[in-house]
């Protein structure tokens, strides 16, 4: 997608993904851990840890999000990613914080660790892997339709 077509949150997500890649995490944006729930960025670390990052480009973007606490059940660590001019005092203290732009970011506050149950981790890791593989396949061969 051309840069000028990206929304502000998508620009933040790109910088977040670059940051997490520098920490040896594999990332996907717009991941659905379960039907009806979509996170901005999900990352799997070298030891199988799963982080979720919600990207908020403005105060209005943040205050309109009513479902973020539902994301906590789908990760070991949860972060907010915001631009440098964001009013960070409104972010909940129980999450981590990343300051980012479209090019990179910095982890300002490490999120507390709340390890996933083994069965959920396995299911989520499989979902992440399948989503990544299907996206890769679609890039290589956009012709075939999805299975029935």
Image: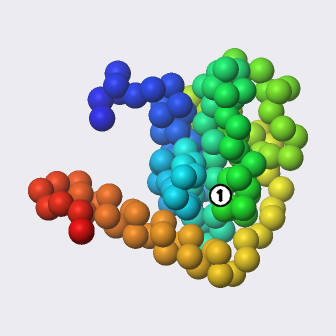
120 or 102: nearer the viewer:
120
| Residue 17, percent from left and from top | 52, 46
Q: Is residue 47 left or right of residue 91?
A: left
Residue lying at 48% horizontally and 39% vertically, measured from the top left: 14
| Residue 20, percent from left and from top | 58, 51
Of all residues shown, which one is farthest toward the left?
143
Above or below 69: residue 146: below
Q: Quadrant of residue 129?
A: bottom left
Q: Quadrant of the N terminus?
A: top left
Disc tally is 1
| Residue 49, percent from left and from top | 66, 68
Q: Quadrant of residue 75?
A: bottom right
Determine if residue 107 is in view.
no
Q: How is the image coloured?
A: rainbow
18 or 30: nearer the viewer:
30
Residue lying at 53% horizontally and 31% vertically, measured from the top left: 9
Per the image, label 1 sits on a secondary structure element best described as strand
Q: Quadrant of residue 107?
A: top right
Above or below 53: residue 99: above
Q: Residues within 10 Å of mark 1 (few under 14, many from 20)?
A: many
Q: Which residue is mark 1?
A: 51
Q: Is residue 114 left or right of residue 1?
A: right
| Residue 106, percent from left and from top | 67, 39
Residue lying at 39% horizontally and 63% vertically, measured from the top left: 132
Q: Is residue 119 left or right of residue 142?
A: right
Residue lying at 48% horizontally and 48% vertically, measured from the top left: 29
Determine if residue 96 is in view.
yes
Q: Quadrant of the C terminus?
A: bottom left
């Amino acid at each position: 997608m051309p840069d000028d077509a990206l929304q502000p949150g998508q620009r933040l997500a790109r910088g977040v993904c670059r940051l997490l890649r520098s920490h040896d995490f594999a990332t996907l944006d717009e991941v659905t851990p379960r039907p009806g729930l979509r996170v901005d960025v999900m990352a799997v670390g070298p030891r199988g840890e799963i982080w979720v990052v919600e990207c908020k480009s403005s105060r209005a973007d943040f205050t309109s999000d009513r479902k973020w606490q539902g994301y906590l059940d789908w990760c070991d660590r949860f972060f907010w990613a915001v631009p440098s001019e964001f009013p960070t005092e409104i972010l909940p203290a129980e999450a981590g914080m990343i300051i980012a732009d479209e090019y990179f970011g910095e982890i300002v506050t490490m999120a507390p660790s709340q390890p996933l149950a083994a069965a959920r981790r396995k299911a989520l890791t499989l979902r992440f892997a399948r989503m990544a593989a299907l996206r890769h396949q679609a890039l290589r061969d956009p012709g075939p339709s999805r299975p029935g």
